[in-house]
Image (tube, grey):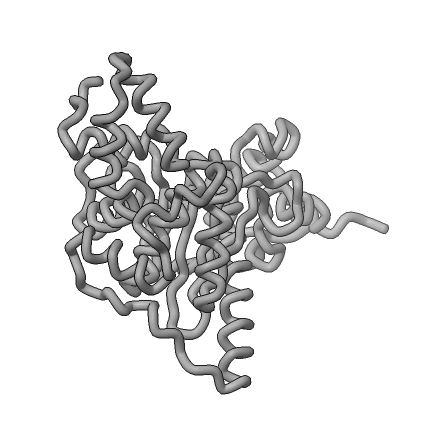
Amino acid sequence: MPAVNVHIHPEILVWALSQVTKEKLGKKLTDNIKYWLDGSKTPTFRQIEELSKKTYIPLGYFFLKKPPVEEMNPLRYRTLNSSELRKPSRDLIDTIFEMGTIQEWMTNYRKERQDNILEVPGSLKGHTDAYKIAKCIRKDLGLSVRWYEKCSNASDAFYKIRNLLEQCGILVIMSGIVGKNTHRSLNINEFRAFAMTNEWAPLIFINSADSLGGRLFSLLHEVVHIWMGESNLYTGGTHFFREIDPVEITCNAAAAELAVPKLEFKKNWEQNQNSDIYAKIKEAASVFHCSEIVLARRALDNKKIDLDL
């Protein structure tokens, strides 16, 4: 059967190239795209099929006149410097769409059952006092201040919070890959978690590529966003020590209060006579089942360490 040549608008090819690394495409396909762009060659339908598979871009998109605008709202995208994440990866886009489908199904299911809308999403909208936010969330979840003491490790603490959230009707999904494709790992440097908020089926997605302690804090961070009625994508990482937007400052502080209560932190710090600050941080982190960066931030906020440490 003879090859079927197809016309693809150059703008679509340029956009497709921006969605994937040249390493993933391979030299042959990368070279072909250059030829298609300069007009010296015309792609075949089979070659466009191959490009679709390599980029994870739906085949139909290649036959549009202009690149599609894949609307990522209602999520707020924030990078380390609080600017918009203008080029989310194909893996992130597909994961958000998949979670959106799950949320939509659960929303419709609960409506059909005539369930009541959930009370917690948005119940703290507009609040800025991190201590009071943490206190309200603990009350809603039935958590004591020292809840972590009944957990043996970070994994145990994570699943304790997860179970309590699910009892409140909040969906918590964790994965390190896109769908069931083991060849598409989620990049922890791009995002650690995201929350999709509505009154019927709020959903939190956790990137399991993160550390155990990191997953716990990401979960608590997104919990605060749910209670504040906001959808959000959490990148985590080094911005934890930088000035970022007011909402994120509040959410970080409230999540830190849930994970490492201020008064309990101070007691632990004062009782630990270890002169090695790094060892002291590590030991305290194991008590609260959190990551060392979360504990270090708590120490910084309480003037126990300097930012230059």
Comparing 23 with 302, the one in front is 302
- Give the image quarter of residue 196: bottom left
Comparing 115 with 242, the one in front is 115
Does 96 sit left or right of 307 as displayed?
A: right
Quadrant where the C terminus sits is top left
- Give the image quarter of residue 301: top left
Give the residue at the far right of this rendering: 1
- Tell me where residue 70 appears, x and y as whole percent: 44, 58
- Residue drawn at the location 15% of the way across and 54% of the way down: 129
Does 228 sit left or right of 14 as displayed?
A: left
Give the residue at the far front of this rendering: 271
- Residue drawn at the location 42% of the way across and 82% of the way down: 116
The answer to whether residue 273 is above or below residue 118 is above
The answer to whether residue 164 is above or below residue 107 is above
Does 33 sit left or right of 154 as displayed?
A: right
Q: How many tags in the picture? A: 0
- Residue drawn at the location 25% of the way across and 13% of the way down: 275
- Tell me where residue 208 appears, x and y as whole percent: 52, 41
The answer to whether residue 107 is above or below residue 31 is below
Q: Can residue 15 be seen in this view?
A: no
Give the residue at the far top of this rendering: 275
- Tell me where residue 61 appears, x and y as whole percent: 55, 57
Q: Can residue 68 be seen in this view?
A: yes
- Residue drawn at the location 58% of the way across and 35% of the way down: 35
